[in-house]
Amino acid sequence: MMAAICTHLDQILVRAPEEVAGCEECLKVGGQWVHLRVCRSCGQVGCCDSSPGQHASRHAAATGHPIVSSLEPGEDWSFCYVDEVAFVVESR
Ligand SMILES: [Zn+2]
Ligand SMILES: [Zn+2]
Ligand SMILES: [Zn+2]
């Protein structure tokens, strides 16, 4: 895991949820996702870039919210779209 060189840690405003139903945008349109990510600025749940919808990165691009965290079981990494760096946040 890379060292944290992200300068947007102050934009982590919400905790990662314990349980989610799935990608919010995919659920609306009946789409499917591969992996789930949660926006740490507003809590929106989206799907990863391996998913057809790529809603997590599209949300980041549309809103400017920089950081998502993985919601996959056993994964605790986060990713900043601005700095394009993965890191582990101490407090989830
Ligand atoms: Zn950053
Ligand atoms: Zn999606
Ligand atoms: Zn957001």
Image: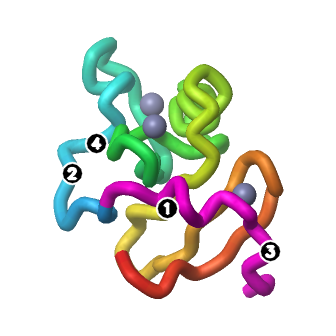
Dot 2 falls on a residue whose secondary structure is: loop
Three-letter amino acid code at the position of disc 3: Ile
Which sits earlier in the primary sequence, circle 2 or circle 1?
2
- Mark 2 vs mark 1, CA separation in Å: 13 Å
Q: Amino acid at mark 1?
A: Ser
Which residue carries the number 1 mark?
Answer: 69
Of tags 4 and 1, the one toward the viewer is: 1
State whether residue 63 appears in this view.
yes
Note whether 7 is above or below 51 in the view shown: below
Label 1, residues with CA under 10 Å away: few <14, some 14-19, many ≥20: many
From this viewpoint, which residue is outermost toward the top? 29
Secondary structure found at label 3? loop
The residue closer to the viewer here, 71 or 11, is 11
Label disc, if present, on residue 9 of the rendered structure: none
Figure quadrant, ligand 1:
bottom right
Q: Quadrant of residue 14?
A: bottom left
Residue, disc 2: 20
Stretch in magenta: 1-14
Could you give the CA–CA distance between mark 4 and mark 1, rounded to whole angstroms?
A: 14 Å
3D distance between C-alphas at marks 3 and 4: 29 Å
| Residue at image point 39% right, 82% down | 91
Q: Which mark is residue 5?
A: 3
